[in-house]
Amino acid sequence: MSHKQMFFFSVKDASSKVSALLSILDKHLVAKESIAVLLSDEKSLHFLSELLWTLPKESFRPHATPFAPCPLALIQLYLPPFITQMPILFNLTPDSLDFPSMRILYELEDTSSPYKAALFQKKFLHYQKQGFSIASLSPPGPFSKG
């Protein structure tokens, strides 16, 4: 069994969530590595897809969705039920994950409410029990490119 790693960002608002997500997507795009982003619902998927096409204004991040598939895109957005063999995942759902192919997992520790903080703690304990090495990442500054 390969070594699994979980990295997380502590975030408290929408801006810090977007900055954390975009910093990781950009990192993997530069490295030419595929990454899957798992979302809970269509509304979230459409919001993120629009964001990837429009932020920043002078650039965009090509990606695929269940509604516009493109197997060659490095960023793949998924809705449940999740079927992916991608080894690098960014989980934007409230549930913990366990895919056999998963090597690197990113999570957001949302501290904006006690409920969201408790959801993260539940996921954290799940990954710890599964033998993941876990590390906190420093949140990036406000997103700006230019």
Image (cartoon, grey):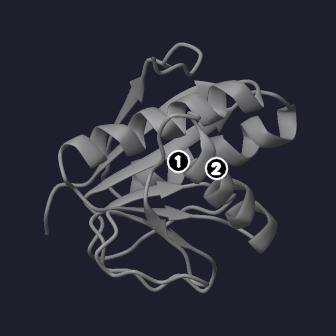
Place of residue 50 in the rendered image (x, y in percent of width and height, measured from the top left): 67, 55
Furthest residue toward top: 141
State the image coordinates of residue 38 (x, y, percent, origin top left): 55, 65
Q: Residue at x 48, y 47 (%)?
A: 60
Q: Which residue is mark 2?
A: 122
Indicate the quadrant containing the N terminus: top left, top right, bottom left or bottom right.
Answer: bottom left
- The answer to whether the residues at label 2 and label 1 have Cβ atoms under 8 Å apart is yes
Query: What residue sits 57% from the left and 52% below the top?
Result: 53
Residue type marked 2: Lys
Q: Position of residue 41 (x, y in %)?
A: 75, 71
Q: Which residue is mark 1?
A: 125
- Indicate whether 97 appears above or below 61: below
Which quadrant, please, contains the C terminus? top left
The answer to whether 112 appears left or right of 94 in the picture is: right
Q: CA distance from mark 2 to mark 1?
A: 5 Å
| Snapshot quadrant of residue 15 | top right
Camera-side residue of 113 and 60: 60
Label annotation for residue 94: none
Q: Quadrant of residue 2?
A: bottom left
123, above or below 83, in the image: above
Dot 1 alpha-carbon crowd within 10 angstroms: few under 14, some 14 to 19, many 20 or more:
few
Residue 39: percent from left, percent from top: 64, 65
Mark 1: amino acid: Leu
